[in-house]
Image: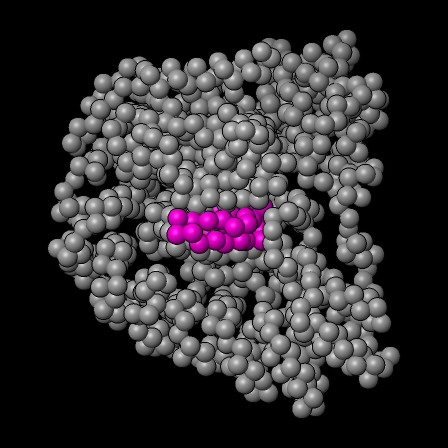
Amino acid sequence: MNLKELMKGLINTAYAFLGAVAVWSCASETRDCTPASTYQYTAMTDSLNGSLKWPEELDIRVFADAGLVPSPACMAVSALGDVYVGVDKMGSLGKDMGYGAIVKLIDCNGDGILDGQSEFARVDNPRGILAMGRKVFVLHTRFSPETKKAENMDLVVFEDNDGDGVADSAAQPLITGLSNPTYLAERGTDHATNGIQLGIDGWIYIAVGDFGFHNATDRDGNRLTMLGGGVLRVRPDGTEMEVYTHGLRNIYDVAIDPYMNMFTRDNTNDGGGWNIRFSHQLQTGEYGYPLLFKQYTEEIIPALVDVGGGSGTGSLYLSDHRWPEMYNQTPLMADWGRSYLYRHPVTADGPTYTQREEPFIQLPQITDIDIDGSGIMYLSAWDGAGYSGSPDIGYIVRAVPRDWTYQPFADVTKKSDRQLVKLLESPDAKARQAAQFELLGRGGGDRISSSVWKLVEKRSLGKAQRVAALYTYAQLAGKVGIDHLVVAAQDTALQEFALRALADRKEWAGAVPAEPFLAALRSENPRIQAVATIGVGRLGIRQAIGQLLATEVPASFKAPALGAEGPHATPNAEIIIPHLSVKALVALDAVAECIDALNSEQADMALWAMRYFHDDRVVDALIGSYDHTDDTAYREKIINTLARIYYREPAYDASWWWGTRPDTHGPYYRTEEWTSTPAIRGFLIKQWEIAGNAGRKVFSALNTKYRLGIDQFGTADLDAAREEALKVDLEAIKKKKGQVGESSIEDILLALEKIKGDPEAGAAIFVRQGCVACHSIDKSEVMKGPFMGQIGSIMNREKIAESILKPNASISQGFATVQIQTKSGEMHMGFVTAESAEKLTIRNIAGMATDIKTADIKERKELDMSMMPEGLANALSFEELASLVAYLEGQK
């Protein structure tokens, strides 16, 4: 037995022991606090509190450490307060099975001290958890018992009906095949499918990374394929799976407010950085990544903001009356790369929002966040476990307002129907959701539906409570409740939500009247217009096509200059309704109506929709329309539309992927000809010949932008950098010098798994790259900056590489930057290399040392940054970086 197998066996034994010692029971209203053991982490809490930036208004303490929850990749908290932690000791780049589990933690009296724990279930790569009543939904990687290789990712549900803290039986699959099996096996879960959240509309929303998925299958047998990332949703019983939005990269979670507004934090990785986009998700919306968000931004819903580098992880919309108003009713978004939980207060802007980003809680490599029914928030920290996980790093913290008083949340499974209906009036989103889920699980009946409907009609109730009641009623009553929902759509306070509920289930479409939606399309309220536009497309209301085509195309529907990047992260409320209208026209297959609209005032809207119709009738009509007009500007639009549909995207079979540095050429990743490609080619060549030299530039530009490959046209005269970007060859990049700067950190770490490097060559690189300017290797040398002579004893290979590539990602003790202000006003920044009671020595990034008397220091603080700049290794090849890492790894 090798060391790896031995460690795995010991870890499994430890988990089995933890499951055996966990003891708790639940009374009808509160839990009996009869734990087998308790865990307190006072010293660890004090240490973190002294080094991290935590709001003074909050009481934050460590709840569980790495001994119980190493490498916590995700987490969920039930309304009752049970904390379910997804342990993943092989991380995002690990490819072995048997290193994951769902660990359940209990604080039975709300005092912040862990009272019990158990291994709830064993699963690999847990990436999303949702705890509702006796059910625990988990998104995780499925491995083959025979090959020991990752097969795919599944959404499953466990049940614990006897309340012993351990799943009763094997998981029940709800959706299978939720990722790309080829790259999941080759790379691990770094770009795979992630967090899951339940909306008050009763759908489970799933954050899909840019691996996408092929032939994901729900319990009805429905299959879906998604090229790239977005949001998928499914009913809790595993039926009615459908795509909600598309065009996102590596979202890890979604934040959903009480009114079903949804927010995400993804990043772009366009080769110039891993910049974070914060977005408002509108159903059917296209957000552009990676094919449209640079050169085709007129066709997307832009993100609300690009906040710079980072790595978004867990999310929560905080809606709890016990939390300070300054923090409440806000999307909270964790950022693993920045080691912070951020607030994004949002302000309504027509059918969408504007926002501002505010740092909230600092936590090293934060992965997830959730809240229970009593107002206790829990956060999980990866804390330097690296891209491949760790068996001994990571923890969970608990946060509550300082003036908060614990009031236990009762077990909803033991409440009467009447009590559950009353609980829908709670001011807290978690309580309302728990009550709704339990009511729906019981099936209800006419009496219960009637009681819930009375809450919908109760105008003295708050809006959030009436909305929760409305969605609960819609799910309880089903088709029978459609008439009541139509009535609710006449209430201005509820119209938006009633319309959404009416269009929410496609299986009801034939029974839903069209008039409420047709009337709502004429509303002056853009939010009502938006939900009605989405609704007519979902319900197949073809009577709306004329109104959709009459939508005004805004001035901002304008392609960026050839070779330039458009505004992919700029609030643009005026684009929302036209964008959704086009999506609805496509859903309604409005080919004939769009053709009829050519040469009319609705032509621009028709041409926009025609970009997504690969239909021979469209091509014939466009060519015919061109021949019957002398309007030069209109002719150019027709030519552009034909060039846009010259190719189409072939079916995605998950055997290929754009990689971590995506192909952003657009509008298709892989192109294939279709039946009308020859006709379009012939028409374009004819017009090119007619145009003569003076008018041919437009054709060379189209040839470049749409990758038409028509030799006669030539290519546009782009700048050299853009020309090179269009010819990028990822395989060639991997073989040339300087490939570190051209690759993502995940690709670099995967390469270092295979390349051991030469320590002797690494010693020379250490000097050549200037590392010696700030670092000493031997204690006999002058101490300039962080000492590297024992780095191999402190960090493993992966951690060393990460620290070189991303110095600010996880700053180890002694490596942080210190800022000192003297009483005379001088400022010094650098590393403290020597210190006594009388003086200290600080050395700056240039290696210059300054002695400062202790008595002269006015202020000294440690900064959340490294003095080492990023990019110092960009010129290295993978082999050279591996050699540098090997050299440092040997310093013990």
Q: Which residue appears at 26% of the width and 69% of the height? A: 486
Q: Which residue appears at 57% of the width and 62% of the height? A: 300
* Colour convention of the picture: one colour
Q: Nearer the viewer, residue 627 or 319?
A: 627
Residue occupying the far top of the picture: 780
Q: Position of residue 398 (x, y in %)?
A: 37, 29
User: Quick check: is 230 in the magenta stretch?
Assistant: yes
Q: Which residue appears at 54% of the width and 77% of the height? A: 591
> Is residue 639 depicted above or below 734 in this figure?
below
Residue 88 visible, this angle: no
Q: Nearer the viewer, residue 824 or 576?
A: 576
What's drawn in magenta, residue-wise? 207-232
**On the picture, is 188 further left or further right than 786?**
left
Q: Main secondary structure of the magenta part?
A: strand
Number of labelled discs? Answer: 0
Residue 529 falls in which quadrant of the image? bottom left
Q: Which residue appears at 74% of the width and 79% of the height? A: 683
Which of the image's four quarters has the C terminus?
A: top right
Q: Position of residue 492 (x, y in %)?
A: 28, 69
Residue 353 falls in which quadrant of the image? bottom left
Q: Nearer the viewer, residue 835 or 330?
A: 330
Residue occupying the far right of the picture: 693
**On the picture, is 318 further left or further right than 275?**
left
Q: Position of residue 318 (x, y in %)?
A: 37, 44
> Is residue 601 depicted above or below 530 in this figure?
below
**On the picture, is 225 further left or further right than 870?**
left
User: Quick check: is 645 in the magenta stretch?
Assistant: no
Residue 648 visible, this angle: yes
Which of the image's four quarters has the N terminus?
A: top right
Q: Position of residue 662 (x, y in %)?
A: 67, 49
